[in-house]
Image (cartoon, rainbow, N blue to C red):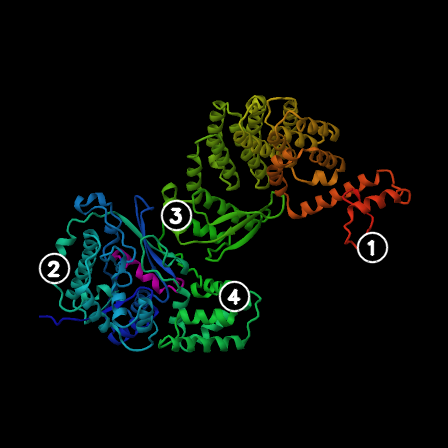
């Protein structure tokens, strides 16, 4: 009979730096020929890529269904994850690595194919991952934690299970805790309450059955020693003499499977605990990374990092601050009866000393050091779907590398590199992979684009989902645009997107759809909504070298049809519909000058609206302002129409809406034309008190939209107009009026007013005594 190999079960906590160090030490001592790791066995073929130095954590094993890439699962790994350290140790020492958890083909299979009595498996977001967390309820119905770590923490006199684990395992730098952990977990499992549902318990039983199945198969191969790295909760189930395989085989028989693919994908520290259904996350990956990587003077090095962050933001932090913060952290650990200062102690000390009690600065340290955002890298040679391979090539050609730190780009489309970047970001947006978001550049030229770019881990999944639409970014984006035919505006937006993403292949199809849809559309506002992106598209086509003559022709046709029915469409609109219509008219007025030969037609249409009695007041005022700005209406005529709109016979609300439409073009006209300002001032001055109170909210909304500098300048000009009006009045001979003033003074001045306190001056346009 062959000699049984030495099997060492290393029960760990996922993403635990102390566990990672202990695993490395145990593997060095054991020198196993085979290392078994909790994870999907389909990932065995990806282990070889750990030899490539470009595979840098944090990364994740991604599994997805071939027929539905949206159905995916992730297994993230960081530098301080025990599994990652076990993988790199095995690859570096020539040991065989096998994953031993349930296959991803089973995890991602359609549960409808399973026994109906076992459907609707409940997600337990914290179970197993950090030791089998479960929640139960006491007799009063209150939640109580019954996870094994909490049980062991209470037994050790701790009220916080996280602190207990940190003190006993994560902060340790020597010793072998695994036998003790296995024994402790065995004791907890014997007395632990059952899972909160039979389905969840069945899931855990199947997982452990699969782990034992793999372990038995490896033992039969006859290696001298085997190292098993698994969650601490599972350690007792894999230690000692294994039970007969009959029951385990029965649990695993007949489970539904699906075809899946697996790949390495980049991950980030901030997403280690945020993936749906993944409960092994940690709140402080930057701290854990530091605990694992710092070889000595852990607290001193940590405080130096925190001080560097503050200095990088131009905040004064001296060496004395660092020294005192280290002393305070050690003192807090002693007061709290902890063997070493933990995250709570260093955070409290940093906030009190480095940040001098300012919580926002402490939050800055938390963001940049405690979390410590970083993005892993995956080498190009790792197998990926064709679409992702095309994306990598395009990103490399555009010299745009995914980063977990948001940064802003101002692209000059006249340069080849920036143009490639723009095209790439637009194509990614079309397929739903929002790597970048458009931001304002502060200019009005068409050759500049502003983007805020940030790569997030879930974008890797979205990229794989998009592979259903094509094998390249061009084919996938063109397919997505070809499916956008809900309404006229959607089609024209797709045409605009095709122009900026340089996808000429889909334009003929979109143009045919646009012609067919426009021929059936009589809604004037829908025509205007479709017109705007179409005009912008033909404008941006110039800078991108695209022939947009056909777009201009179609846009002109839409404008002509909209102009023909605009007056009738606007008559008698309700306030909400009128507000929407005004926005459409504003957008159209903005883009019409970009359409060759269209401005005169649009201006003539606006002029026909001037005398329509059924026009909503907000639109009427806006049309007058547009024509006034364009020089088609004189200031005198605008004043007459202003007077007519604000005259008796209209309600206060209608007057305010007309004024709001007239003034929504901005205050520059009022600032630079004192005659128009005087007309508005006159109207306000003539309002009765009750009318003024009625229109005040609408006027406040109008003037509140002006920028603070514009409001200040308007106040200055208004004061000048008032002074000019006063200066035009006949001069008052104060000497001749001395007797009258003395009488008024005696009436208005209280007896307590000291003699000689009176003064004469001009205030608010009148004589003040």
The answer for how far apart the CA atoms under marks 2 and 1 are is 112 Å
Res. 439 visible in picture: yes
Asked which quadrant contains residue 684, the reply is: top right
Q: Nearer the viewer, mark 3 or mark 4?
A: 4
The crowd level at tag 4 (other Cα within 10 Å; few <14, some 14-19, many 20+) is few
Residue 45 painted magenta: yes
- In front of the other: 638 or 26: 638
Which residue does the image show at 78% across and 46% down from the upper left?
748
Nearer to us in this view, 109 or 744:
744
In the displayed structure image, the side of residue 635 where residue 345 appears, left or right: left
Q: Could you say where residue 734 lies in the image, as x and y percent from the top left?
A: 88, 44
Name the residue beneath numbered marker 4: 358
Disc 4, SS: loop
Q: Which residue is denoted by mark 2 in the rendering?
A: 245
Between the residue at mark 3 and the residue at mark 4, the CA separation in whole angstroms equals: 40 Å
Magenta region: 40-57
Q: Assign a secondary structure to mark 3.
A: helix
Pointer 2 local density, CA inside 10 Å: few below 14, some 14–19, many at least 20: few
Q: Is residue 715 above or below residue 675?
A: below
Please tell me how many numbered marks the rendered image carries.
Answer: 4
Q: Name the residue that disc number 3 marks.
A: 462
Please tell me whether mark 2 or mark 1 is closer to you in this view.
1
Q: Residues within 10 Å of mark 1 (few under 14, many from 20)?
A: few
Q: Position of residue 460 (x, y in %)?
A: 39, 51
Q: List the single residue furthest toward the right.
A: 736
Q: Which residue is mark 1?
A: 755
Q: Residue 309 vs residue 260: left or right?
A: right
């Amino acid at each position: 009979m062959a000699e049984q190999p030495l099997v060492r079960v290393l029960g760990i906590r996922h993403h635990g730096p102390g566990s990672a160090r202990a695993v490395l030490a145990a593997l060095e001592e054991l020198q196993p020929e085979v290392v078994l790791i909790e994870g999907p066995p389909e990932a065995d073929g990806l282990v070889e890529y750990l030899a490539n130095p470009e595979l840098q954590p944090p990364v994740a094993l991604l599994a997805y269904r071939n027929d539905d890439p949206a159905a995916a699962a992730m297994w993230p790994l960081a530098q301080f994850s025990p599994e990652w350290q076990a993988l790199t140790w095995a690859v570096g020492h020539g040991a065989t690595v096998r994953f031993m958890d349930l296959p991803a083909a089973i995890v991602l299979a359609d549960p409808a194919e399973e026994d109906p009595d076992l459907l609707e498996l409940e997600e337990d977001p914290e179970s197993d991952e950090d030791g089998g967390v479960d929640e139960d309820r006491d007799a009063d119905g209150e939640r109580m934690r019954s996870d094994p770590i909490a049980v062991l923490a209470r037994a050790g006199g701790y009220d916080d299970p996280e602190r207990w684990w940190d003190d006993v395992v994560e902060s340790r730098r020597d010793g072998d805790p695994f036998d003790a952990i296995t024994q402790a977990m065995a004791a907890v499992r014997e007395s632990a309450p059952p899972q909160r549902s039979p389905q969840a318990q069945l899931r855990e039983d199947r997982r452990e059955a699969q782990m034992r199945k793999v372990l038995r198969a490896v033992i039969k191969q006859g290696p001298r020693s085997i190292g098993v790295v698994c969650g601490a909760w599972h350690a007792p189930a894999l230690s000692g003499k294994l039970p007969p395989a009959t029951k385990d085989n029965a649990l695993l028989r007949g489970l539904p499977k699906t075809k899946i693919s697996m790949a390495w994908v980049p991950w980030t520290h901030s997403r280690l605990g945020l993936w749906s259904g993944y409960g092994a996350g940690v709140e402080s990956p930057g701290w854990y990374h530091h605990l694992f990587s710092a070889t000595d003077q852990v607290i001193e090095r940590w405080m130096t990092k925190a001080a560097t962050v503050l200095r990088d933001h131009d905040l004064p932090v001296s060496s004395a601050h660092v020294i005192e913060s280290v002393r305070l952290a050690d003192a807090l650990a002693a007061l709290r009866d902890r063997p070493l200062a933990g995250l709570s102690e260093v955070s409290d000390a940093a906030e009190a000393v480095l940040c001098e009690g300012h919580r926002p600065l402490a939050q800055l340290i938390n963001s940049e050091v405690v979390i410590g955002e970083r993005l892993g890298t995956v080498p190009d040679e790792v197998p990926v779907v064709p679409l992702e391979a095309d994306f990598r090539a395009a990103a490399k050609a555009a010299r745009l590398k995914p980063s977990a730190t948001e940064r802003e780009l101002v692209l000059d489309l006249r340069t080849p590199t920036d143009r490639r970047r723009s095209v790439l970001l637009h194509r990614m947006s079309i397929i739903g992979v929002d790597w970048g978001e458009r931001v304002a550049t502060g200019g009005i030229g068409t050759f500049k684009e502003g983007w805020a770019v940030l790569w997030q881990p879930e974008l890797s999944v979205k990229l794989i989902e998009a592979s259903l639409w094509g094998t390249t970014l061009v084919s996938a984006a063109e397919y997505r645009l070809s499916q956008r035919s809900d309404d006229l505006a959607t089609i024209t937006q797709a045409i605009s997107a095709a122009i900026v993403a340089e996808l000429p292949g889909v334009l003929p199809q979109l143009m045919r759809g646009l012609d067919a849809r426009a021929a059936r559309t009589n809604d004037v506002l829908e025509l205007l909504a479709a017109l705007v992106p179409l005009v912008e598209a033909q404008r941006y086509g110039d800078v991108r070298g695209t022939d947009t003559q056909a777009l201009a022709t179609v846009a002109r046709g839409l404008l002509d049809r909209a102009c023909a029915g605009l007056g009738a469409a606007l008559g008698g609109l309700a306030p909400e519909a009128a507000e929407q219509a005004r926005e459409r008219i504003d957008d159209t007025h903005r883009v019409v000058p970009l359409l060759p030969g269209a401005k005169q037609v649009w201006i003539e249409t606006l002029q026909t609206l001037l005398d329509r009695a059924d026009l909503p007041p907000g639109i009427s005022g806006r049309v007058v302002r547009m024509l006034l700005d364009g020089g088609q209406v004189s200031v005198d005529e605008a004043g007459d129409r202003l007077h007519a709109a604000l005259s008796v016979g209209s309600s206060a609300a209608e007057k305010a809406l007309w004024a709001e439409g007239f003034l929504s073009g901005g205050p520059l006209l009022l600032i630079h034309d004192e005659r128009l300002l005087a007309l508005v001032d006159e109207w306000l001055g003539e309002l009765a008190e009750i009318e003024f109170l009625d229109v005040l909210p609408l006027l406040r909304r109008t003037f509140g939209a002006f920028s603070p500098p514009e409001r200040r300048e308007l106040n200055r000009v208004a004061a000048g107009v008032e002074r000019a009006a006063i200066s035009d009045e006949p001069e008052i001979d104060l000497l001749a009026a001395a007797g009258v003033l003395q009488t008024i003074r005696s009436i208005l001045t209280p007896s307590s007013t000291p003699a000689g306190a009176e003064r004469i001056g001009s205030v608010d346009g009148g004589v003040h005594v």
